[in-house]
Image (spheres, grey):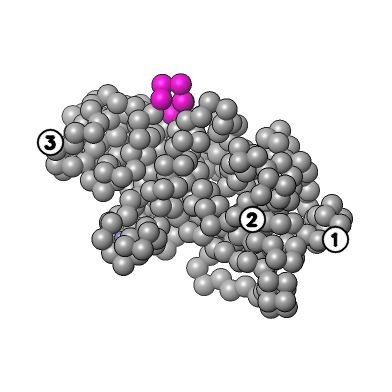
Amino acid sequence: MQSSASVVRTRTDRPGMMHGHVLVRPGEIAFRELPRPVPGEHDIILRVRAALTCGTDVKAFVRGHPKFPMPTLFGHEFAGEVAEVGARVRTFREGDAIMAVPTAPCGQCYHCDRQQENLCETIMETMVLGAYAEYVKLPARIVALNVYPKPASLPFPVAALLEPLACVFHGLESVPLRGDDVVVLLGAGAISLLHLLVLRTLGIERITVVGRRAMRAEHAKRLGAERVLLGDLGAARDAVLADTHGRGADIVVECTGQTEVWEAAPSFARRGGQVVLFGGCPPGSQVRLDTQRLHYDELRVLSPFHFTPRAVRRAYDTLTNEGFEGHALITAVYPLAQLQHALSEHRNGEGIKFAVVP
Ligand SMILES: [Zn+2]
Ligand SMILES: [Zn+2]
């Protein structure tokens, strides 16, 4: 355990400086005094009021991540208040409570031109990392497209769900849904539970969650899953078949990013069903799929990535709707200095998501 994490008072007094977490190398986080970001003409400096733990951050901390060359600032799910704006920012003012996502497309490349902004050539390389700090800079392209006012009634940690929720909306955008669809969610972590909440707001009631940990499964039950299946994938598939007159589910969403779950996902789907492979697997992963099922049973297989501004807008509209139970996904709130503890709890499956608050 780094002792530095527990000694420093959270808000720094030195002008132009702030505290933030640096991922030094896999397994090592340092809580340091860092220069506070300065806005360019079109940028916003956000005073972070909540940043959430995410599976991606846990993976980066534990084993490294190709997208995070170290040392690096990290943390990409956040909400807060405008601390400072660039000279040409007209849309927001100092003190405004806002919610945002950590990326925005360029609007000019081949993919942006075809409304596939999630695949924009520069969307990932311009991603904002560094929400596990007192301040973070939102660059012009995010300010222009993907920043929204936060209603006072929405707590900051819940507002910080905007990014993962946008991913979920993007994934569902190309999946035709019917109210009587039987849906199977493989996995019971935050992404699965966000799918559950969204599908329920869309009027879908027959949702089965397949998980491994009793605590998370319990959550799924409370959030309205019709059925929760624990343990072995084969047994879970048999139970789904038994529930559907041997047909299988209309829609299967893989939410774990594990190759064995990707491979098992089609076996839960009915003929003509849809399989969404949502969870990203480690680099270099390969999977084997049953071509008989894919072809002769005409399965529709999708593997959506990231999100478009359309999906952010839908996520925003949903999150700011009073009935949406996003708060149920935030297991606990810790001071910023205790990030490492929050990431460990996330990793151990002792909750869904954790917020750190400067
Ligand atoms: Zn995330
Ligand atoms: Zn682009």
* Residue at 46 percent of width and 25 percent of height: 154
| Residues at circles 1 and 2 in contact by the CB criterion of under 8 Å | no
* Residue at 23 percent of width and 26 percent of height: 94
* Residue at 31 percent of width and 62 percent of height: 113
Residue 350 visible in the displayed image: no
Q: Is residue 115 above or below residue 213?
A: below
Q: Residues within 10 Å of mark 2 (few under 14, many from 20)?
A: many
Residue 308 visible in the displayed image: yes
Quarter of the image holding residue 214?
A: top right
Q: Is residue 328 above or below residue 21?
A: above
Does 51 lie within the magenta span?
A: no
- Which quadrant holds the C terminus? top left
Which residue does the numbered mark 2 point to in the structure image? 253
Q: Nearer the viewer, mark 1 or mark 2?
A: 1
The circle on residue 87 is 3
Q: Secondary structure at mark 2?
A: strand
Sequence-earlier tag: 1 or 3: 3
